[in-house]
Image: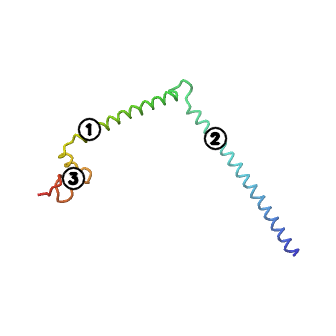
Amino acid sequence: MATNVTEILDRISDGQNELTAEQAQIASTLAAQSQVLRLISEQLGIVIEKLTPELGDGPTMQELLAELVARVGDNGALLRRIDRRTDSIATSLSDDVVRAMKGAAAANGHGAAAGQSADGSAAS
């Protein structure tokens, strides 16, 4: 029984020694990563500093945002006009034009079936 206890204690001691060595390695790796992150942070700070305009140099953030909002508003009005025109064109087309467009073979590859003309009647 004493031999088993001694072996168990030796294994526990070996495990603790191995664990201590691994913890030291982890601490070393974390220290190295901290240094790398610190260097990256410093370099990023330099990049941000170079990209940040001086006060009064170029448009302000508010001016840029105002310009973007104005452009989006202009585009919205234009798109509404295009929608209204498209709707009016679709409702004013004659039935013959609509049938011809539906049956037209060519442009998009979804045209008339084989053996039929563009208007859907049997080809002669």
Q: Which of marks 3 and 2 is nearer the N terminus?
A: 2
Cβ–Cβ under 8 Å for marks 3 and 1: no
- Disc 2 marks which residue? 41
What's the distance in space between the residues labelled 3 and 1, CA to CA? 25 Å
Depth check: give the residue in front, 94 or 23.
Answer: 94
Numbered-mark total: 3
Amino acid type for the residue under numbered disc 1: Ser
Cβ–Cβ under 8 Å for marks 1 and 2: no
- Disc 1 marks which residue? 88
What colour scheme was applied to this rendering of the protein? rainbow
Cβ–Cβ under 8 Å for marks 3 and 2: no
* Residue 97 picture location, percent across and down: 19, 45
- Disc 3 marks which residue? 105
Q: Is mark 3 on a helix, strand or loop?
A: loop
What's the distance in space between the residues labelled 1 and 2, CA to CA? 58 Å
Q: Is mark 2 on a helix, strand or loop?
A: helix
Q: Residue at x 26, y 38 (%)?
A: 88
Relative vertical location of residue 102 with respect to residue 79 in this rendering, above or below: below
* Residue 90 picture location, percent across and down: 25, 42
* Residue 32 picture location, percent across and down: 69, 49
Camera-side mark, 3 or 1: 1
